[in-house]
């Protein structure tokens, strides 16, 4: 449980910061994403990072209990899958990302989702 709390604290800080940042600066984040989509080296690095990060999470925190800690495990598996897909099918992943971020409602939804996830992790990591 100590590892779960430690990871929840890290995720809380990251998700809350990114969620608020996306909400306050959507144009900046849109430009950043557009720039990453065009840079093959950054996509490759992102794939390697996601693969390594996902593997570390899955290897050290593969807990499938019916409580909040399963969220960490799910994030680990998603990161691992994302890393594989970015390295194996980068053009498919960029196309999917562009579709997910298309439309004027996409940024508020994603920033709200990140903020909620951050608050959930913050609650379990710092308060509960």
Image: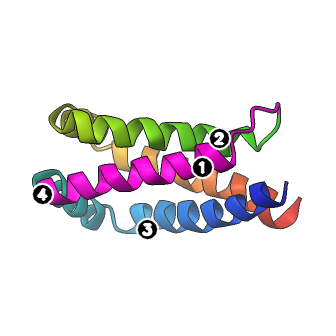
User: Would you place residue 100 above or below residue 120 in this image?
Assistant: above
Is residue 2 at least partly visible in the picture? Answer: yes
Please report whichever mark, 3 or 2, sits nearer to the chain's N-terminal start. Answer: 3
| Secondary structure under the numbered disc 3 in the rendered image | helix
Residue range highlighted in magenta: 40-66
1 or 4: mark nearer the eye: 1
Q: CA distance from mark 3 to mark 2?
A: 25 Å
Q: CA distance from mark 2 to mark 1?
A: 7 Å
- The quarter in which the C terminus is drawn is bottom right
Residue at image position (36%, 43%) is 83
Tell me, for residue 80, which label it has, or none. none
Q: Residues within 10 Å of mark 4 (few under 14, many from 20)?
A: few
**Quarter of the image where one finds residue 105:** top left
Please report whichever mark, 2 or 1, sits nearer to the chain's N-terminal start. Answer: 1
Which of the pair 127/107 is nearer the observer?
127
Tell me, for residue 21, which label it has, or none. 3
Q: Position of residue 77 (x, y in %)?
A: 54, 37
Please report whichever mark, 1 or 4, sits nearer to the chain's N-terminal start. Answer: 4
Q: Which residue is mark 2?
A: 73
Q: Which residue is mark 1?
A: 57
Residues at circles 4 and 3 in contact by the CB criterion of under 8 Å: no
Residues at circles 1 and 3 in contact by the CB criterion of under 8 Å: no
């Amino acid at each position: 449980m100590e590892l779960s709390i430690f990871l929840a604290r890290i995720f809380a800080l990251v998700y809350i910061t990114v969620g608020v940042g996306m909400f306050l600066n959507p144009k900046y984040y849109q430009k950043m994403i557009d720039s990453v989509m065009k840079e093959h080296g950054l996509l490759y690095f992102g794939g390697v990072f996601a693969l390594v990060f996902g593997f570390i999470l899955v290897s050290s925190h593969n807990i499938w209990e019916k409580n909040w800690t399963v969220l960490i495990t799910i994030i680990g598996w998603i990161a691992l899958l994302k890393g594989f897909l970015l390295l194996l099918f980068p053009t498919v992943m960029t196309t999917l990302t562009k579709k997910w971020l298309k439309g004027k409602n996409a940024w508020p939804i994603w920033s709200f989702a990140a903020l909620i996830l951050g608050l959930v992790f913050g609650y379990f990591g710092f308060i509960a």
